[in-house]
Structure formats: structure tokens, C-alpha cells
Amino acid sequence: MTEQLSEHYKAILESLGEDIHRDGLRDTPKRAAKAMQFLTRGYEQSLEDIVNNAVFESDISEMVVIKDIELYSMCEHHMLPFIGKCHIGYIPDGKVLGLSKFARIVDMFARRLQIQENMTKQIADAIVEATGAKGVGVVIEAQHMCMMMRGVQKQNSSMTSSVMLGLMRENQPTREEFLQFIRHR
């Protein structure tokens, strides 16, 4: 796959009028192909592989919040990066998930071409699937290079998306508790 992607990058560079034989670009098609494979490795991952049996019995029934999980993704419209943070809250129902698995779930969905709104829902659904949680809240705040580097070129813009499931959606005080936890100092 690397070789095929490399040939496509070579064609793109040549279409732009670049000399792919000059020093700075000689290995660029191969490097770009490897980078793209890394940036989209989420397609090769599954929730089952990510969770890897790291779901543990627990009698905790209070909210658990994980804040500021860094994410790097690429929009499906322009294939330009968006960069931000994901905040997750969930109310366990007899099971908790290993802490590092939340970051791995975020990365799995972030490492696919897509839009922030869909990624937010995918992360929330995956946490419910993995844990059977009574409620899940996911909020993502990100800056999109497609808006900053091209088009309207607004450097200070950011986007916030949220998905609330179960008790986080149905119970206003529970939702407010989660949102209070993730408010920045």
C-alpha cells in the first residue's frame, strides 16, 4: 500500500509543477505515504482490539470524567488536520473501563477521515458499547485547518460538538454536573 500511495503523491507533486527529483522532494512521496497511513490507521482498528478485555467490575455509580484528551484528525472534506481536545464523562453500571482505553478509543476514531460531529457520536457510542454505561457525555473542542488555512481563513475559530446519551441526555442535573467538570479554569 505504501508504494501505491507513494505513486499518487508523486503524481500530485508533478501536477503542482514540482521537480520530484530535487533534493528536498526526492523521498517526499514515500514519506507522505507513510504519514498518511499513520494518520488513518484507525481504519485498521476495532473497538474489541482497543478495549482488549480492560473492562472491570466495579460498584461505583458516580460519574467518572476524563478531560483534555488530545486529538489529531483530518477532515474528510479537504483532508486537512483538525486538532483539539476530547472530554468524556460516563456513569458506570457495574463496569469501568481502563483509563488509557478512553484515549485509545478517541485515537481510533480520530485517525480516520471524517467530521468532528460524527467522531463525537462514534466515541460516545463506543463507550456505551464497551461498558454498558448508564450515561455518557462526550464534548470535543477543535480547531480546523480547513477553516484557518484556506477559505475564510479565521485563525481564532474553534468548534465544539457534544453528544449526550442515557442519563447524560435525560437528566439535566447530571448533564450540568458533567459540563461543570469540564469547564476550563
Image: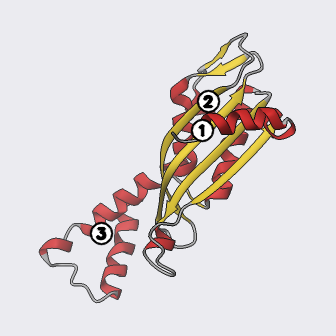
The label nearer to you, 2 versus 3, is 2
User: Residue 142: where, in percent of width, then height?
Assistant: 53, 56
What amino acid type is highlighted by mark number 3?
A: Pro
**Residue carrying label 1:** 182
Instruction: Check the image and report above or below for 114 versus 8.
Output: above
Location of residue 18 by image quarter: bottom left
Q: Which residue is pictured at 57% across the width and 25% down the height? A: 52
Identify the mark nearer the N-term, 1 or 2: 2
**Residue carrying label 3:** 29
Location of residue 113 by image quarter: bottom right
> Decide: marks 2, 3 in contact (CB < 8 A)?
no
Question: Which element carries disc 2, helix, strand or loop?
Answer: strand
User: Residue 131: where, in percent of width, then height?
Assistant: 71, 26
> Decide: marks 1, 2 in contact (CB < 8 A)?
yes
Answer left or right for 63 relative to 150.
Answer: right
What amino acid type is highlighted by mark number 1?
A: Ile
Question: Which element carries disc 3, helix, strand or loop?
Answer: helix
**Residue carrying label 2:** 65
What amino acid type is highlighted by mark number 2?
A: Val
Q: CA distance from mark 2 to mark 3?
A: 41 Å
User: Residue 35: where, in percent of width, then height?
Assistant: 36, 57
Q: Nearer the viewer, residue 115 or 111?
A: 115
